[in-house]
Amino acid sequence: MLQVLSGVWALLIGIVFIMLGNGMHFTLIGLRGDIEGFSATELAIVTSGYFVGFLSGANLTPKMIRRVGHVRVFAALGSFMSAGLIALPLVAEPWAWTPLRLLVGFCMSGVYVTAESWLNDASTNETRGKVLSAYMIAQTLGIIGAQGLLTLGDAGTATLFIGASILVSISFAPILLSVTPDPAAEVTRPMNLVELFRGSPLGTIGIFVLGGVYATQSGMAAVYGTQIGLSANQIALFVAMLFAGALLLQYPIGWLSDRMDRRKLILGASALGAVSCAAGWLTDGALWPLMAASFLAGGVTTPLYALFLAYTNDSLSTEDMPAASGGLVLTFGVGAILGPLLAGWAMQAVGPFAFWWVLGGMFTAIGLYALYRMTQRAVTPVDETESYLGVLPTATPVAVEAAGVWAAEQAEADQAEAERMEAK
């Protein structure tokens, strides 16, 4: 593993610093928004603005790279992102924050596309799975670490926003000073959503609803925390638990994914998510039960994303997987835009605990649809499924396509090995 990482360590260090800055700003939006008196609906619109920008960046950045190259795009987007973060406390108004968040989301997505292109180019068929796993861990650790940094300052001042901007700015140094190849930035045209739905109804609908779950968790958790009276440190811990759960539960769920009917696992994971949301509501703000609910609700979200990718690939030919990956990222992005809007409206209308109701309702919808699909299509034999690889919901089509290629190659290798053993 150390030998694999020796060629991409600078990229991974840069990603950690980027996620420290980006993770700080996500929670800061909720903390500072409460101080400024923003409503839940206004903060939901601000949150959705980020995901509008993120989805746009994933589609447009490859074209920019083909025009001027990776290094220029990477440096330009990093500069704009840093400027956007530092501008947030200067004009603390929803009408200003929404376009700024759209800018940050666009730049962040573009940074991901560029970094993932470099990572993919630096990997071989044998090392791609390990490199993508290391990339996922680096991202998650950066987000968790960002919540610890929030305890060092006051969200009511510009200090933490400046800190987030500095972290993003310095993150580009190890990357730009060490990366010399200029890899291709080709992203396959996304599959038509009608074709995607025909190929995998559960994958399409499930990942759309999951987009709402992920964006609500990452964008509205701090808003919920402020509204129930948690301190800034407690809110940081609450958000950190969402991602700590994702980091720790990814592997056992991934292990099960390659050994059982994935629809049953999707049903089980979504049921666990719904139960944890019910528990979060029933805690009535009690700290440690609330943290446990956060750990479990966040813990099943990221594995569900990778499950839907793997399950969809099971229904497609190898040639269709890259296009399907783009379609799934698009579908997830639309859900991510709509999810916070629904949660913000509900929290504004009936109170902060609607945060759990909306999340629980979305988890329940995923589980019920998975149950329905189990009656409509025969189970795919385990030995005919594609291999599972943990991919974060923040991944762009570049990483998702790379994961799909790796999964197909891994499945073919496993099948060849099984046939060789039978021949003996």
Image (cartoon, helix red, strand yellow):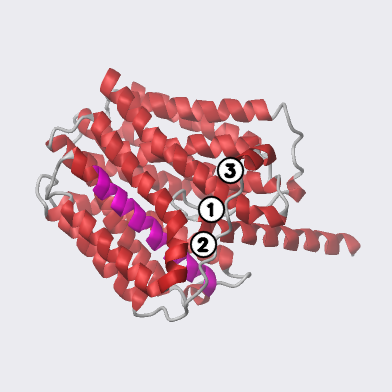
Q: Is-magenta flag for residue 59?
A: no
**Is residue 195 among the parts visible in the rendering?**
yes
Furthest-right residue in this view: 423
Furthest-top residue in this view: 350
Name the kind of residue labelled 1 in the image: Gly
Name the kind of residue labelled 2 in the image: Leu
| 283 vs 338, nearest the viewer | 338
Question: Pointers 1 and 3 in contact (CB under 8 A)?
Answer: no
Residue occupying image coordinates x 62% and y 30%: 370
Residue occupying image coordinates x 29% and y 25%: 347
Instruction: Name the N-terminal-most of marks 2 and 1.
Output: 2
**For residue 336, side relative to residue 266 (left or right):** left
Residue 303 spot, x, y in % from top left: 52, 45
Q: Is 104 situated above or below 27?
A: below
Q: Which residue is mark 1?
A: 390
> The residue tagged with tag 2: helix, strand or loop?
helix
Question: Pointers 2 and 1 in contact (CB under 8 A)?
Answer: yes
Residue 413 spot, x, y in % from top left: 74, 63
Magenta region: 98-122
| 56 vs 373, nearest the viewer | 56
**For residue 314, side relative to residue 419 (left or right):** left
- Disc nearest the viewer among 1 and 3: 3
Q: Which residue is mark 2?
A: 132
